[in-house]
Image (tube, grey):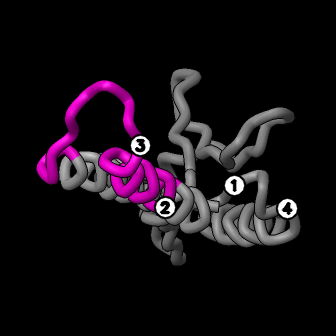
C-alpha cells in the first residue's frame, strides 16, 4: 500500500507543480515554486515509504522487532505472549506489567500472512519457554 500511495503523492505534486505556471491564478509562480512543490511531493512520498521498513526476525533465543523508527530485541523469557487483539492493526508482544510492543511487520491487512506470522512467533515462543 505504501508504494502506490507514494507514487500517487509524487504524481499529484508534480502535476500541480507543472500546472502552477500554465494557469492564470493571479499569482506569479516561479520555477523555484515548481521545484519546491515537487520537493514537497518527494518528501511526502519518502515518508509514505517509511512504512515498508518494519521487520521482525525471530529465532530460538528471542525476537528482533524493527518498526518505523525504533528497533528492539526481546529474549523469549521477557515475552509473556504474542497477541493480535480484535480491531488492532498490528500484532504485539505482551510484556510484563501490562506493557506491550507493537510488531508493525505483521499487519492486519496482510490477512493470511499475518495469521501465519503470528502462529510462527507463537511456536517459537512456546518452544523457548517450555520447561
C-alpha span from label 1 to label 3: 43 Å
Residue 123 or residue 10, whichever sits in front: 10
Magenta residue span: 9-33
**Label 4 vs label 3: CA separation?**
45 Å
Label 4: state its secondary structure. loop
**Residue occupied by mark 3:** 23
Picture coordinates of residue 42 (x, y %)?
32, 58
Q: Are marks 4 and 3 in contact (CB under 8 Å)?
A: no
Look at the numbered disc 1 and give the secondary structure of its residue: strand
Find disc 4 in the rendering and name its residue: 111
Mark 1 is surrounded, within 10 Å at the Cα level, by few (under 14), some (14 to 19) or many (20 or more) other residues, namely: some
Q: Which residue position is annotated with label 1?
A: 107
Residue 117 vs 100, above or below: the answer is below
For marks 4 and 3, the one nearer the N-term is 3
x and y, in percent, of residue 40 in the image = 29, 47
Query: Closest to the observer: 128 or 30?
Result: 30
Going by the image, does 31 lie left or right of 19? Answer: left
Which callout, 2 or 3, points to the residue nearer the camera? 3
**Is 33 positioned to the left or the right of 4 in the image?**
left
Residue picked out by circle 2? 11
How far is the residue under mark 4 from the one under mark 1? 8 Å
Q: Residue at x 35, y 45 (%)?
A: 20
Amino acid at each position: 500500500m505504501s508504494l502506490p500511495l507514494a507514487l500517487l503523492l509524487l504524481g499529484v505534486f508534480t502535476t500541480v507543480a507543472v500546472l502552477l505556471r500554465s494557469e492564470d491564478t493571479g499569482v506569479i509562480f516561479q520555477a523555484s515554486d515548481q521545484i519546491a512543490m515537487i520537493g514537497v511531493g518527494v518528501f511526502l512520498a519518502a515518508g509514505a515509504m517509511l512504512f515498508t521498513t518494519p521487520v521482525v526476525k525471530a529465532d530460538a533465543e528471542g525476537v528482533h522487532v524493527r518498526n518505523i523508527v525504533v528497533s528492539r530485541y526481546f529474549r523469549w523469557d521477557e515475552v509473556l505472549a504474542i497477541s493480535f487483539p480484535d480491531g488492532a492493526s498490528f500484532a504485539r508482544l505482551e510484556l510484563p506489567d501490562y506493557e506491550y510492543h507493537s510488531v508493525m511487520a505483521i499487519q492486519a491487512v496482510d490477512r493470511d500472512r499475518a495469521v501465519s506470522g503470528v502462529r510462527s512467533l507463537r511456536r517459537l515462543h512456546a518452544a523457548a519457554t517450555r520447561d
